Image (tube, rainbow, N blue to C red):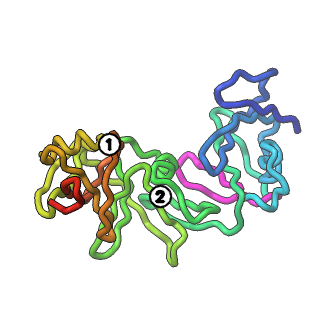
Amino acid sequence: MDTVLKSVDREPQQQAPTFETQIGDENFDFLAVAFDDAKVTGGQLCMAVGRHPVEDYGVLRHLGTGELETLRPTETTDLDKNKVSRFFVVKGGDTHRFFVEGLAMEWPHQKLIASQIKFLAGAGDDQALTLERPGIDQVFDDDDEVDIGGGGVERFKLRHRKKTVTVIYGGDVEFELERRVYTTEQLMTVFGVPAGYKLDIIASDGVFREMAPGERLKVKDGMEFASHPPVGQSS
């Protein structure tokens, strides 16, 4: 069986066979690969993108429903003649199972970025990935790292994303800000930090860190800030 390998962004070097696929890696970077046969094995998908020995890699098919299913090296799958079939070839052993809105997924690594999980589930920019547990809802920003390899099977939901976040300044003053990146100076203006003072961001463990001039920060719900004069005393 012949294959043609090309970058997704480039034109094929020769007449493309009938069955088009996209094969992604752990970073969700894809290559376009064309096969002349409707049936391929997990091992053939690995070899098509130069991944070997094939036993060291997990092969997953990204179904039209959004679900992911593992394909063994000798297992055969049928390619779709009418649309591009999508796969992932990722180095790793055991897969970690999780669900998004009831869609069954698995991945060879313990962590994924929230935007990657949203991509798999076909979520839009106006949706946020949420982990729902008794008594707590954890909402992830798109660039947050998500642990899917815990003790149990995690179940995620997609919720409408608020366009604003609530942050706290000075211990008790709440500000509702547009969800975006701010510079240190922009935040100081919003909070009304006195001239000459320095702005601190307070970590979840209570540690204060002085923000550098011109530093860029994407604000998230619940972030806390404080200010202090140049001598180092808190305001």
Residue with the most extreme bottom position: 151
- On-image quarter of the N terminus: top right
Q: Amino acid at mark 2?
A: Glu
Q: Residue at x 64, y 66 (%)?
A: 95
The answer to whether 37 is drawn above or below residue 153 in the figure is above
Could you classify mark 2 by the number of other residues whose Cα lies within 10 Å: few (under 14), some (14-19), or many (20 or more)?
some
- On-image quarter of the C terminus: bottom left
Residue designated by label 1: 213
The stretch of residues the image draws in magenta is: 59-74
Q: Quadrant of residue 93?
A: bottom right
Q: Residue at x 81, y 38 (%)?
A: 37
Query: Which mark, by number, is residue 76?
Result: none
Q: Residue at x 74, y 30 (%)?
A: 6
Residue designated by label 2: 145
Residue 87 spot, x, y in % from top left: 66, 47
Residue with the most extreme front position: 231
The answer to whether 5 is drawn above or below residue 13 in the figure is below
- 159, 56: nearer the viewer: 56
Q: Residue at x 81, y 45 (%)?
A: 50
What is the CA distance from the residue labelled 2 to the residue labelled 1? 27 Å
> Helix, strand, or loop for circle 2?
strand
Please say whether residue 70 is one of the residues in the magenta stretch. yes
